[in-house]
Amino acid sequence: MMIARRLLLAASLLLAAPLAPAQEQVHLRMSWWGGNDVHRAQLRALEAFEARYPDIKVTAEYTGWVGHLERLTTQIAGGTAPDVMMVNWNWLKLFSRDGDGFLDLHGVADIIDLGQFDRDALSMSSVRGRLNGLPPNMTARLFWFNETTFRKAGLKVPDSWEALMAAGPVFRQRLGPDYYPLDMNFQDTLALLYSWMSQRSQSAFIDEEGRRLLPDRHLLTEAARLYQQLVDNHVVPSARQRASFGHVQLQETRPWITGRYAGAYQWTSAIGKYVETLEPGQRMVLAPYPMLPGAADPGLLYKPAMMYAINRDTRHPRESALLLQFLLNDPEGVRILGARRGVPASAAARRTLEEDGQLTGLALEGQRQIESLPRGIVLSGYYEHARVRDGFNDILEKQGYGMLTPEEAGKAMEREINGILQRVIK
């Protein structure tokens, strides 16, 4: 009887005892931009992450490029930004001027293997010593030419500024007036002039402390003259000629598809989409990077192609860090994402894709060329500030339509861009 009472008491105590709580489910939100192929791969990677970490669920928020900045700006201003978000590199100047706009990833370095990223990737992703994000890949503008068209003109692809300038008249004479060695919009033109001026001066382009351009009026005028020479020598189409295609991207125009526009000064992360639209039988190649005599630094426009950042106000910083580690360094996540964003910045990710044979072609060749070139001149994020970019584009457009001489364009760059930098650099 006593034993029965004791068993009954033990059973009642067990029934009264609270059950051990199940581990709390963590919900994260992640946003990015891209095309459909990127979206599909990113969603598969999130599914694999959730399978690895069943107690973490991730809600995906993805868009195309157009409108993404406006949407993210509204979210950040309203305190509704995702836990993990893709940001453009130059947006750090908008959202994190003091370095406290995003979570400092040094605080979760026990989860994310930062040692897989080189000095440039980490330094260009930092503001005042705070690591604001990590780049899936680094990118630079390089020269890519349609070797098929150049052979048709009886030329090798240019390996110097002089060879590029000399190719224009040959194209016009041998192939016809609608063939050009290179095509550029105004933003591409500014990028080319940036590199040329950097080679001339062997110094940075923007003085952030002084809030001004480092090239003086004389060098800016010389750059404007170079643009005029490129047009006059039939190296690039005139502004009016190019405008006849409307606001269509270069890779979608008939002259590019058919090989009549035979070159691009483009990012390593973007060259794939230019190759994809070429008609069969054409071959795009990477050219040696042109250097002015005596220049030691090529003045590469080298930067993070984009970055993953963590919301500084997230309730789940460690789980968000686990997600970044999975996407950027973990073999499973890396294999799913592949090289869709370009050659990975993470050394571990690159090894994984190289072992799998996923790293081939022009993007890999471009990465190797970048690594072979000096990178002492560091690109300022203010170069890509929307007002700075639009200011340069407006001046080059006026010059392109004959509204400004090169001398007037040089003066306008010095006056107007310095005025913009005074306003935007705080």
Image (tube, grey):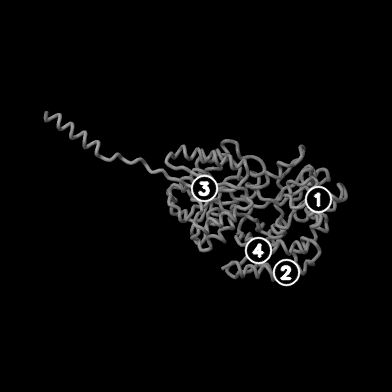
Q: Which residue is mark 3?
A: 30
| Type of the residue with mark 1 | Tyr
Identify which residue is drawn at 53% across, 55% down. 75
Image position, residue 230 (x, y; %)? 79, 57
Specify the label residue 388 is tagged with: 4
Quadrant including the C terminus? bottom right
Identify the residue position indicated by label 2 in the image: 412
Q: Amino acid at mark 3?
A: Met
In this rendering, the answer to whether 221 lies above or below 259 is below
Query: Which mark is first along the chain, 1 or 2?
Result: 1
Could you say where residue 322 lies in the image, as x and y percent from the top left? 46, 45
Q: From this viewpoint, is residue 235 visible?
A: no
Q: Residue at x 50, y 54 (%)?
A: 80
- Nearer the N terminus, badge 3 or badge 1? 3
Q: Earlier in the sequence, mark 2 or mark 3?
A: 3
Gap in angstroms between the C-alphas marked 1 and 4: 29 Å
Q: Earlier in the sequence, mark 2 or mark 4?
A: 4
Disc 3 to disc 4, C-alpha distance: 30 Å
